[in-house]
Image (cartoon, rainbow, N blue to C red):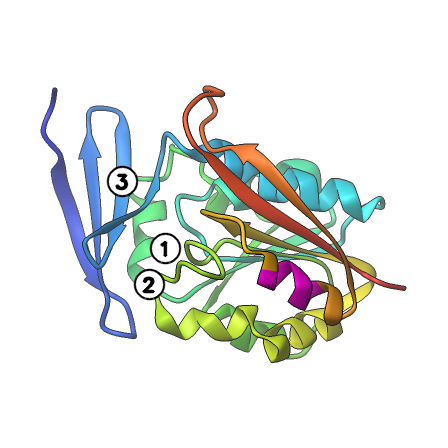
Amino acid sequence: MLPWETLDTATAPDGESLDLRRRGDEFLIRAGGYDLMSSEDDGSSKALSSLGLLELGRPAQHVLVGGLGMGFTLREALDLVGPEATVEVAELVEAVVRWNQGPLADVARRPLEDPRARVFHGDVGARIRKPPQRFDAILLDVDNGPDALAHDGNGALYSSSGLAAARDALTPGGVLGVWSFSDDRKFTARCKKAGFETEVKKVQASRKGRGRFHYIWIAKRRP
């Protein structure tokens, strides 16, 4: 088996270390010494966009993606919206944007080069609260999930106040989608209490349709 090659390292604003690695055709991002995402596990990242925009039930004009990662969620959203739509991605770590413009560019078919894509350099929670705020969908893939944080600062996104901010930033009937490594019934309860009609979807992590599963919350703002 080929060894992993470290292509670059970076430090997140909270001090967490990030590594970009490659082994053959596979890329891996690690955070704080733990695997955060692999280019082999694009299935669930794409499902975050496809399930969220399907639940919306109307053409999306303005979508916010939280977390660029390897670009899969952004790419899928761009493939599903119309030519006049805007898909904005909020990414806290500038190195991740640079990686997507460089060694990771072809992994998700160069989504940052799509003229409908916009990059917000900063925390997605701040973007949610920053006007203009009316998004048809907010798709969060910023961490390992509500109960498995890679960055402690992301906990606020999944709190009652974070969910209330997301609800207020959505158009009536808008959708909040949240990716997670594991299920969390307490988070489901918080979504419902915050005014969302909520379902949890169990999806294959890999495009190959085998191996582990991930979880996606599809939370629709009540009209």
Considering only vertical position in the picture, is 27 above or below 94? above
Asked if residue 60 can be seen in this view, the reply is yes
Q: Which of the 4 image quarters holds residue 7?
A: top left
User: Of the numbered discs in the image, which one, if any, rests on residue 94?
Assistant: 2
**Mark 2 surroundings within 10 Å by alpha-carbon count, few (fewer than 14), some (14 through 19), many (20 or more):** some
Q: Residue at x 33, y 55 (%)?
A: 96
Q: Nearer the viewer, mark 1 or mark 3?
A: 3
Tag 2: amino acid: Glu
In space, the residues marked 2 and 1 are separated at their CA atoms by 5 Å
* Of 149 and 130, the residue lying toward us: 149
Asked if residue 78 can be seen in this view, the reply is no
Question: Residue 56, percent across and down?
Answer: 79, 48
In space, the residues marked 1 and 3 are separated at their CA atoms by 15 Å
Question: Residue 160, percent across and down?
Answer: 62, 76
Image marks 1 and 3: residues in contact by CB distance under 8 Å? no
The quadrant in which the N terminus is found is top left
Residue holding disc 1:
97
Type of secondary structure dominating the magenta stretch: helix
Tag 3: amino acid: Leu
Image marks 2 and 1: residues in contact by CB distance under 8 Å? yes
User: Of the numbered discs in the image, which one, if any, rests on residue 28?
Assistant: 3
Q: Nearer the viewer, mark 3 or mark 2?
A: 3
Question: Residue 130, percent across and down?
Answer: 61, 79
Tag 1: amino acid: Val
